[in-house]
Amino acid sequence: MKKIIIAAILGLTSALYSADVVVYPRSTGYPYQCPAPKTGQTNSYATGDDGEFQKGVAWPAVRFTVQDNTNCVRDNLTGLIWARNANLNSTNTWSNQIEFCESLDYGGQTDWRLPNIREIQSLFDFGRYNPALPTGHPFANVQNNNYWTGTSDPAFFDTYATRTHFGGGSVGNVLKTTLYFVWPVRGP
């Protein structure tokens, strides 16, 4: 039987973990299922690791589609739309990058935002590094560096937020005054 992750709204962490299914509550309180994708790790380094089991939903045959005349990329696994250029703004603080996304007019769209931690992590291919993105990805100017997420650290929500590092696919929490890159997203 598959375990189900119950992920809380408002940035609270979940209590149960599974490689197959994630359930997120909607703002109405009714849950919906979202498949957890495979990580991309195919080599096994120890019995029982991700490389051996490769749990999760398989990526679509065509993971990313460049949208005509917009310079945007649709992730066919998550349904999210990403800016094709992963370096639209210089490094900046967390709050300044949020403002940048909210004021961005790119690809004829104005509903851009800073991705949450789960959204930006969905881009990672843990079988790769420098950058930790799937082979043949269509993105430009991806920095092997830190990118902000819109997710605050729940233990220090006033001063810390979560960042991702695309050199190796790592995640961490840092002061919101630190200067990092931004990769705008829109969609679900």
Image (cartoon, rainbow, N blue to C red):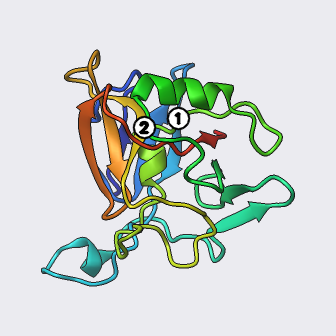
Query: Where, quadrant-wise, is the N terminus in this rendering?
Result: bottom left
Q: Position of residue 31 (x, y in %)?
A: 51, 32
Mark 1 or mark 2, which is nearer the start of the sequence?
1
Residue 92: image tag: none
Q: Position of residue 15 (x, y in %)?
A: 24, 36
Q: Amino acid at mark 1?
A: Leu
The answer to whether 186 is drawn above or below residue 169 in the figure is above
- According to the picture, the residue beneath numbered tag 2 turns out to be 149
The answer to whether 177 is drawn above or below residue 123 in the figure is above
Q: Position of residue 135 (x, y in %)?
A: 51, 78
| Residue 89 shown left or right of residue 12 in the figure | right
User: Helix, strand or loop at disc 1?
Assistant: loop
Residue 114: image tag: 1
Report if residue 173 is visible in the image: yes
Looking at the image, the residue that sits furthest to the top is 158
* Residue depicted at 34% across the width and 59% down the height: 19
Contact flag, marks 2 and 1 (Cβ < 8 Å): yes
Q: Position of residue 65 (x, y in %)?
A: 72, 65
Q: Amino acid at mark 2?
A: Thr
